[in-house]
Amino acid sequence: MTVEMTALLDRIIQGDALTCLRSLPDCCIDLVFTSPPYADNRKNTYKGIPIAEYVDWFLPLSLELKRVLKNDGTFVLNIKERTEDGERQTYVIELILEMKKQGWLWTEEFIWCKKNCYPGKWPNRFRDSWERCLQFNKQKSFKMYQEAVMVPIGDWSKRRLSKLSATDLRRDESRVGSGFGKNVSNWLGKQYVYPTNVLHLPTECANRGHSASFPVSLPAWFIKLFTQEEDLVLDPFMGSGTTAIACLDLGRHYVGIEAMESYQKLAHESIERWRAANRSNSRQMALWK
Amino acid sequence: MTVEMTALLDRIIQGDALTCLRSLPDCCIDLVFTSPPYADNRKNTYKGIPIAEYVDWFLPLSLELKRVLKNDGTFVLNIKERTEDGERQTYVIELILEMKKQGWLWTEEFIWCKKNCYPGKWPNRFRDSWERCLQFNKQKSFKMYQEAVMVPIGDWSKRRLSKLSATDLRRDESRVGSGFGKNVSNWLGKQYVYPTNVLHLPTECANRGHSASFPVSLPAWFIKLFTQEEDLVLDPFMGSGTTAIACLDLGRHYVGIEAMESYQKLAHESIERWRAANRSNSRQMALWK
DNA sequence: GTTCCGCATGAATCGATAG
DNA sequence: ACTATCGATTCATGCGGAA
């Protein structure tokens, strides 16, 4: 890792996202996770980008993100288009098409299904309880650690697998085909299964009193899936620091960028609170050894 | 209703979708619900449209659908883009943009979350467990009956709802429809809440003889939401008749189009089975009065 | 009649193999 | 090289037969 990079590690740079991104070296980031400022046609709104300008505003950023990302790294973009004038706006899907022209591969679209979404009632639509998590990559093969996000198998299996019949066992064995000891590992493996591309996470954020646009568990899920410990995660719109907290929790390094000084301050406070809470843990850990 | 229209009511026309659509009069349909043939680059596949041609293939159809739909009617398009060469293909989002140019409003995108999705394991992606249900309208104000799709409130009932199979839902509907009068509606108002734009429905599997691409509960949900009894629902790709069954269950009229004679036959068989099963119910209903 | 258990089967996707 | 086909992987559910 370069000297300039080491100096930025686990820090939140205050400044314009595009300018700061340009100061980062090539191919140094393992995962970009971010939830950029939403489009907004109202004036005088914090960080709101007019809908008509959204794609043109984002494209220089995505180009820089492609430059700083490692070739086998991943970019996850959490975004949802606004409703305006009774219609879903199209800037997000236009952005996908334009990013492909930049050379990005649109690998997958995850759905973040918000269990407790914003309340409300409208005559012509229901509450919006999902957001897109768009996965982009630079090349077809990329790092992915699926075992890190396995989930407990469904309730149906408790009845079903609690009493494995002889035929079940036999069938499993025959399927394995080669090698010994695989029986046991297969059976143990059935406690957990791979998830799907729909995430069911509550909207609540872990830090009370501070508004984050997404819960820590959202970046945490993608960080576990696409990085290993000591890897480097970038969030060019760090906001109140949720991605950084997820990195601290998981032993990953982070680089954040945030234009608003007030938000940067909030993020630093969150991080300090995390460190304070973990200092005692570290001591306890040390005592255990 | 015109004479020509009355002759088509509750029938499945066998023929090419575009040709048959052109024979329908203007502004006569309350809801279009369909799941068109999915794109497929493989040759020799039934009804598969090559990915590169998909948008051009669909646009003449969507134009006709706009013509036959009532001004305050709704078009719901159930579709999901394929993965090809490690990427999500873009023809669906391109289609949205092109349909807007035709004058359609892209009002909403519902997510159909399939709990029992296709199994499999791959190094670079998880199982795909969701599909798009794109809502399009001709004008900003359209008919919507939100009370018809309210769901039970509370965690215990949420858990129960998530475990409701398609047959359970159908049974629920029939129970609701069997005339408890005001008692039920009062009870409904207190115990039930409006749903969100995410639908949790299992796919129907182990169906004998044919593969139904979606469960009856999927069209049923949109039919309840966007139509009233005696309204007219169109499915230009009727397949094995799932949309027709939903209409029969809910007392709506339907017009179906299906090119493949074998599928049309399957649909007729399903409908006949439905009528046979309901004949006894009708007798019972008559006895009650 | 219920309840339980065994089994088949998906609007899938990738990588290897064959033409 | 490039394309077409095939086998392997995997989990939630409905259905049918058995207890």
Image (tube, coloured by chain):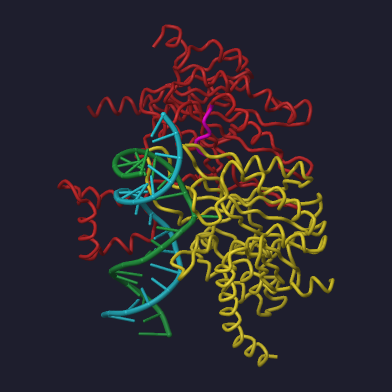
Chain colours: A red, B yellow, C green, D cyan
Quadrant occupied by the C terminus of chain A: top left
Quadrant occupied by the N terminus of chain A: top left
Q: Position of residue B243 (x, y in %)?
A: 63, 66
Does A281 appear above or below D5? above
Please tell me in which quadrant of the rendered image residue B287 appears. bottom right
Judge from the rendering whether residue B182 lies leftward or rightward of residue B70; answer left or right: left
Does D17 appear above or below A270? below
Q: Position of residue B79 (x, y in %)?
A: 59, 51
Does B170 appear above or below A123? below
- The question of residue A45 being in magenta is answered with no
Judge from the rendering whether residue B81 lies leftward or rightward of residue B95; answer left or right: left
Judge from the rendering whether residue B285 lies leftward or rightward of residue B160; answer left or right: right
Closer to us: B80 or B19:
B19
Closer to us: C19 or A122:
C19
Q: Main secondary structure of the magenta part?
A: strand
Please report the residue visible at 64 percent of the width from the left and 19 percent of the height from the top: A260
The furthest residue to the right: B2
Count the marks. Answer: 0
The furthest residue to the top: A3
The furthest residue to the left: A180
Closer to us: A220 or A97:
A97
Please report the residue visible at 76 percent of the width from the left and 46 percent of the height from the top: B105
Q: Position of residue B154 (x, y in %)?
A: 56, 59
Please report the residue visible at 51 percent of the width from the left and 17 percent of the height from the top: A67
Please report the residue visible at 25 percent of the width from the left and 62 percent of the height from the top: A168
Q: Which residues are magenta?
A: A104-108
Closer to us: B179 or A77:
A77
Please tell me in which quadrant of the rendered image residue A63 appears. top right
Q: Position of residue B203 (x, y in %)?
A: 50, 60
